Amino acid sequence: MILDYVIGIINEHGEAAVRIGDVARETGASTSSIYHYFNSRDGLIAAAEVERYSRTLEAFANWTEPQFAQVTSKEQFRDLVLATHRATYAPDRSSQRMTRLNAVGSALGRPLLMEKLAAVQDGIVVRYAEMFREPQERGWIRSDVAPIVLSAWTLGHLLGRVLIELGETSVVEEEWNRISDAVVLFAYFGEMSELSGPEAGSTSDELGFRQ
């Protein structure tokens, strides 16, 4: 409950608006309890940042795992890979990327926070790598790319789209999507072919994912 409240404050007003007194009053926790569990105001903020970062990754991983588990052919797998990437290109996912970027920015100068974010990130990378291991064994993914590396690249690539979502941009988003699709097809399958599947930019709701 404490973390939920602090996350809400950070999302709406930033870290500077977090005050221990307000947290205690609004959550019903004693000030001494907050200091006992989080050591300091900075410790509380760091814990909230880790939780913010983790939730965005966990939510998407929880959606993709059952989707990949249902795939029975390379064609289905290929279409699903494109569909999941395109779901993240949609405007309704940009806030999740911004949350992760904000958390990483907050970790600069905070070694312990950076270490905890790295642990969360690595856990998700390993989790995605396991999703890719069986498809590779079946010959659906190119054999010269390690699943762990493909997993890390995928998550980095998806986060990278935030660079054209910071505000006004000269980049045509549909063109970014088109190039991204081509790169994804090459990274996973070693191919540059005619695209198929859901239209680029489909909302994640249309693909069955809700935050």
Image (cartoon, helix red, strand yellow):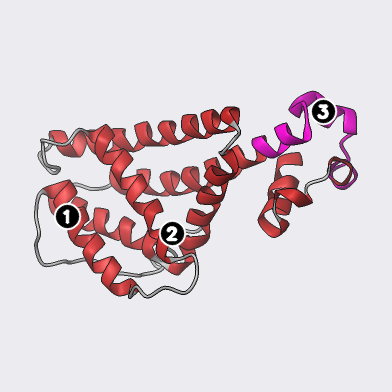
Q: Is residue 173 magenta?
A: no
Dot 3 or dot 2: first in sequence order is: 3
Cα separation, mark 3 vs mark 1, equals 49 Å
> Could you say where residue 209 lies in the image, as x and y percent from the top left?
44, 58
Residue in view at x 36 percent, y 43 percent: 65
In the picture, the disc for residue 185 is 1
**Which region is colored magenta?**
23-46
- Look at discs 3 and 1 and give the one toward the viewer: 3
What residue sits right under mark 3 in the picture?
35
Residue in view at x 60 percent, y 33 percent: 110
What residue sits right under mark 2 in the picture?
162
- Give the secondary structure at mark 3: helix
**Of residues 66 and 129, which is closer to you in this image?**
129
In which quarter of the view is residue 185 placed?
bottom left
Q: Amino acid at mark 3?
A: Tyr
Q: Amino acid at mark 2?
A: Val
- Give the secondary structure at mark 2: helix
- Residue neighbourhood size for the residue with mark 2, other residues' Cα within 10 Å, grouped as few (<14), some (14–19), many (≥20): some
In which quarter of the view is residue 160 placed?
bottom left
Label 2–label 1 contact, CB within 8 A: no
In the picture, the disc for residue 47 is none
Residue pushed farthest front? 109
